[in-house]
Image (cartoon, coloured by chain):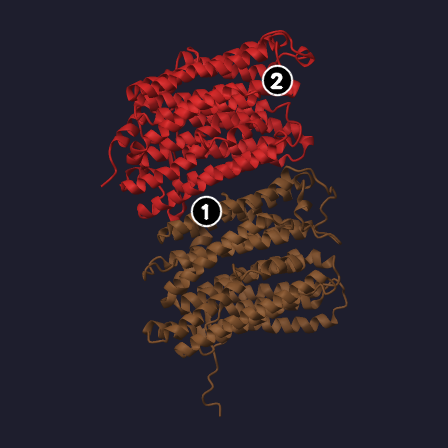
Chain colours: A red, B brown
Amino acid sequence: MSTYPLLSLAIWIPIVSGLLVLATGSDRNAPLARMLALLGAIAAFLVTLPLWTGFDAANGGMQFVELKSWIPRFNVNYHLGVDGISMLFVVLNAFITIIVVAAGWEVIQEKVAQYNAAFLIMSGLMNGIFTSLDGVLFYVYFEASLIPLYLIIGVWGGPRRVYAAFKFFLYTLFGSLLFLLALMYLFIQSNGSFSILEWHQLPIALGAQIWLFLAFLIAFAVKVPMWPVHTWLPDAHVEAPTGGSIVLAAIALKLGAYGFLRFSLPIAPDASHELSGLVVALSLIAVVYIGFVALVQTDMKKLVAYSSIAHMGFVTLGFFMFSAMGIEGALVQMVSHGFVSGAMFFCIGVMYDRVHSRQIADYGGVVNTMPKFAALFMLFSMANAGLPATSGFVGEFMVILGAVKFNFWVAFAAASSMIIGAAYTLWMYKRVIFGDVANHHVAELTDINKREFAILGALALCTLWMGVYPQPFTEVMHASVNDLLRHVAISKIQ
Amino acid sequence: MFDNFLVPDFLPAAPELFLAVMAMVILLVDLTVKDSRRTLTFALTQLTLLGCAVIQLMTSTGDVVYTFSNMFVDDLMADLLKLFLYMTVIVVLFYSRAYLLDREVMNKGEYYVLALFATLGMMVMISANHFVTIYLGLELLSLSMYALVAMNRDSVASTEAAMKYFVLGALASGLLLYGMSMIYGATGTLEITGLAERLYGGGANKTVLAFGLVFMVSGLAFKLGVVPFHMWIPDVYHGAPTSVTLFIGSAPKLAAFAIVMRLLVNGMISLAQDWQVMLVILSVLSMAIGNLAAIAQTNLKRMLAYSAISHMGFMLLGITTGVVGGDARFALNAYSSAMFYVLAYVVMTTGTFGMILLMARAGFEAENLDDYKGLNKRSPWFAGIMLMMMFSMAGIPFFVGFFAKFSVLQAVVAAGYMWLAIVAVLFSLIGAFYYLRVVKLMYFDPPVDTSPLTAGMDMRILISANGLAVALLGIFPQMLMSLCAYALLRSL
């Protein structure tokens, strides 16, 4: 165990380096801003590695805990810690931040410092969300992270960026305001504590649990996003710059799912059991219906955005099976989706930078001019479709396995998505990559450069590693997931 | 002949006396000032306010001290509010300086003297323990303000605003006075502490008391600017010269909060069940109308006027939750969160209007929303400061506005009014839209006007400090929060 406040470093290194990047000012210093941002992102990633290597997999409780008083007036503490559920996301987040900074290296030429700073600050805030053990601290990070993403979409986004930015902000703010009231209710019920871990032990009547659960559900369902409050996501994704889409898909969507495990299940276990049918139904709709919606998209980014919603449906489905297999599968799916969707959006970004179109119809025969790219894109498409030996398979398989024990027909519906997923992903791949060279834009394409190859290569390695040997990822989860399940099995009604 | 005359203890009122004397001295000194920039007047005014702060700190005992036959009270709440008041007025005058220099017609000695008299009025309101003292302070403030609004006498809009302000203000004073007279009729006392005792003892005529209370709450609502007594706010904010709008929008909120505390909480806490219901209605209406109407505005000053209405509504929520079913154990929590809200709001609103003054230059007011288009291209630093102000007003962390909303909301939830809390957050969601729109204009849109900002270095530093205060108070809100709680604990 390290004596350094690793979690604080993981939060504040990106934020402080973001502010430093901001201080480089105008675009004359753009190279310096990029360099600083990359260094900051790498430093932040390096400090998160000891979290994984030094993690005690046998311990299901919180590790690397930091506890300081923050606002004694309301008994709010600066309380950080990670368990097997949250640790991987901190590492993933730090990793994706490097990818994002690298992804915008040549593409972003305007307001470079602000662009990179927004991503770094966002990354720090999201680490804060994953590691907070205090309700107010969590909420503060949760809501503050809206600001950078709002600016990223609005400043560097596509033609309808203003609409998308507002929709994103107001939608998520709506969810989180009710969540804030739920936190305050718990504060009163627990006689003045904002400690999430204490709330886990707090007995609550069923009626109150149901209200709390619904407040949590609205907040997190918007963030995940679950059907029917998902409509902000395709807009946000389509209009966001490539880096914004990567962060949104790879990390920001995980915040909502993570919230279910940290708040909904342990604080309102009886309501979770009571209302699990609702969540399972919404998840299945996301998996099947949104899968079909993805099938008919003509815009590549929109297609991947809908596929993200479908994949996140698997995650929420896995959570509400109340089995170790389901929850671990969902967690694996979340990490895997971080790599795969990030890579998919990056691939689309690569083509967009060259052709300035996201329409499937504007492409065709890309393999002829970009063979290296086509090969890597193939890998990620397969992973997105859930092909064995890629990371996409492991999580989906575990969730379906968990679902079979839960209810055969649920498992059946979930499994059908493997086919739909393969259909929309591979059909898009076929139309974009294969065939004859469709037009002169495609004919003029140049294959990926070293920077792009490095990014895609790194993501490809992660995808394959997780697909072939998921052990290092799953072993850290076991103890925490089992603790959670034991806790959820005990009624809190008194 | 003077047998019954006791020399009162002047010490608790020392800052007021000092300010009154200095205001008159400055008025005389200004006659000899030839300099059209009025640098001497300005400097003396600022030194006077600084002197008040020093005297306040030196004479504060921390106890509740009554003087002038119990007409005047000095307690920690008064000390804290007054210190904040001096600071606000000092900052306000600094912000206004360049604006006034660009507009010779307003840069008169009277401007500074009126500002000082208004400040004196607010100090008297904050320390009043008697209906007459409250009225005295209120009128001193209001009359100075009417004149300040009309300072730019050639402007039709300003004159119209001053007229509206005067007529409606006089009406409000009338309502307040009428309420006071009825309560006097019912209880036979004008003194606030005495009133509390009489009401506690019971026996007052309930009908007269109820009428008096309604009139008094209406008068207070006028002064706070909450719906349905808010009509003057948008017109006055819009029509007044921006430097005066800044003044009206900031410091008087502190005084208004103080008289609400003095009259309703100190004086009529036994009637809390009655006035709380009225405040709930006022508060919900203000949040609704304020936030909805702000969306439709294209003028930033007018938008901020509606935003002020909604903020005052939100602040009232804190005051409505002090007594629950005859149980006053939440009182301290509730009132101190309302006080924190007011202080936080004053910091934010001062900075926001300060930005309008910073953007303004000779012959250009920078009060339309479109004037802020592309500010991020023109000056990333000040766009960033304005961004912080806007997100803070919308109640997004890590800014002080979030903790202001947070503390009031937790008081509401603690008192068991969950529905009220839900209404409040839904309206703040609506409110977030128009603050976001300002950020959108600054960041997402290309600039229309590309001329660089002309503000001087002192202004730039002060605005930056104000912006950082909004952020720092948001990251470390504990000190100010506990200060409010402590001051009220020692005063109630």
Q: Quadrant of residue A299?
A: top right
> Where is A98 relative to B130, above or below?
above
The chain holding disc 2 is A
Residue A258, position as x, y percentages in the image: 40, 30
Tell me which residue sits at (30%, 24%) in the image. Answer: A323
| Left or right, residue B420 beside residue A233 | left
Q: Amino acid at mark 1?
A: Val
Mark 1, secondary structure of its residue? helix
Q: Is any atom of residue A20 visible in this view?
A: no
Mark 2, secondary structure of its residue? helix
Looking at the rendered structure, the number of numbered marks drawn on it comes to 2
On whether disc 2 and disc 1 are found on a single subunit, the reply is no
Report the front residue among B86 and A187. A187
The label on residue A472 is: none
Q: Are marks 2 and 1 in contact (CB under 8 Å)?
A: no
Report the front residue among B278 and A379. B278
The residue that mark 1 highlights is B425
| Left or right, residue A329 beside residue B262 | left
The residue that mark 2 highlights is A351
Residue B273, position as x, y percentages in the image: 37, 63
Residue B420, position as x, y percentages in the image: 41, 51
